[in-house]
């Protein structure tokens, strides 16, 4: 069975929004190698509509700058949980209706192949956690205070809770810590 691995950038004050505005100074060789290893160990990308919209606009133009990493981002199968996505227009993309998300993602996990990677922690990640489908949560903790994030950020949601157990850590010279967690039985 394939695992679903969530990879999320987070600031010291818990902000996950707009990481492109506050993570680039910390993305050096070690982080690039780690991100590459993670991406190439997975055979599909799972995302929500907001992440899909950002990625589908940015990544097609980034192949030249990022080489095989960009090619991999653009050519992996993409699965997007969305009720409104009609014409994805970004490589091999399949839209999954919200009402069918749990059953369809369960089927994806049961397929043979490499693991499934999910970037960002929003409504799709919440669905995964609440339904026992998330296997690993990798928080890239950045040594920066960003300021107030959106009240929509799931990590700050009052009606959401889950417990995890630390399974691994990786510390980069820039001070970024990747803390890998696995869900605990409740």
Image (tube, rainbow, N blue to C red):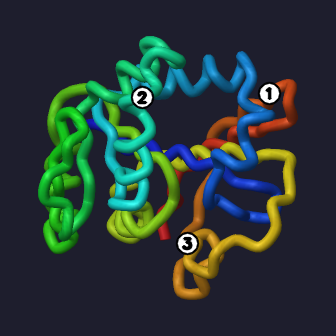
Tell me what residue is drawn at x 63 percent, y 22 percent. 32
Q: Is residue 83 above or below residue 91?
A: below
101 relative to 6 in the view: left or right:
left
Q: Residue 111: x, y in percent?
A: 15, 36
**Secondary structure found at label 3:** helix
User: Residue 60's image quarter?
Assistant: top left
**Secondary structure found at label 2:** helix
Q: Residue 185: x, y in percent?
A: 48, 63
Q: Residue 84: x, y in percent?
A: 19, 68
- For the residues bearing labels 1 and 3, Cβ distance under 8 angstroms: no
Q: Which of the two discs, 1 and 2, labels the residue nearer the N terminus?
A: 2
**Secondary structure found at label 1:** loop
Residue at numbered disc 1 = 172
Tell me the distance, in whole angstroms, between the alpha carbons under discs 1 and 3.
26 Å
Tell me what residue is drawn at x 86 percent, y 46 percent. 143
Residue at numbered disc 3 = 154
Mark number displayed over residue 21: none
Q: Which of the two discs, 3 and 2, labels the residue nearer the N terminus?
A: 2
Q: Residues within 10 Å of mark 2 (few under 14, many from 20)?
A: few
Tell me what residue is drawn at x 26 percent, y 60 percent. 81
Tell me what residue is drawn at x 51 percent, y 53 percent. 120
Q: Residue furthest bottom?
A: 159
Q: Residues within 10 Å of mark 3 (few under 14, many from 20)?
A: some
181 relative to 111 in the view: left or right:
right
Tell me the distance, in whole angstroms, between the alpha carbons under discs 1 and 2.
28 Å
Residue at numbered disc 2 = 61
144 relative to 162 in the view: left or right:
right
Rendered-image quadrant of the N terminus: top left
- For the residues bearing labels 3 and 2, Cβ distance under 8 angstroms: no
Q: Residues within 10 Å of mark 1 (few under 14, many from 20)?
A: some
Q: Is residue 97 above or below residue 36?
A: below
């Amino acid at each position: 069975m394939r695992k679903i691995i969530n990879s999320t950038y987070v600031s010291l004050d818990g902000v996950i929004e707009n990481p492109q505005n506050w993570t680039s100074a910390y993305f050096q060789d070690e982080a690039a190698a780690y991100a590459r290893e993670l991406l190439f160990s997975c055979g599909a990308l799972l995302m929500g509509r907001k992440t899909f919209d950002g990625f589908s606009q940015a990544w097609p133009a980034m192949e030249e700058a990022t080489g095989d990493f960009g090619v991999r981002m653009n050519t992996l199968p993409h699965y997007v949980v969305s009720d409104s996505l009609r014409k994805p227009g970004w490589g091999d993309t399949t839209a999954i209706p919200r009402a069918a998300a749990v059953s369809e993602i369960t089927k994806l996990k049961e397929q043979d192949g490499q693991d499934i990677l999910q970037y960002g922690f929003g409504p799709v990640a919440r669905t995964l956690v609440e339904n026992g489908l998330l296997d690993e949560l990798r928080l890239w903790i950045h040594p920066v205070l960003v300021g107030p994030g959106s009240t929509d950020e799931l990590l700050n949601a009052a009606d959401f809770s889950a417990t995890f157990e630390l399974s691994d850590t990786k510390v980069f010279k820039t001070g970024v810590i990747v803390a890998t967690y696995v869900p605990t039985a409740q």
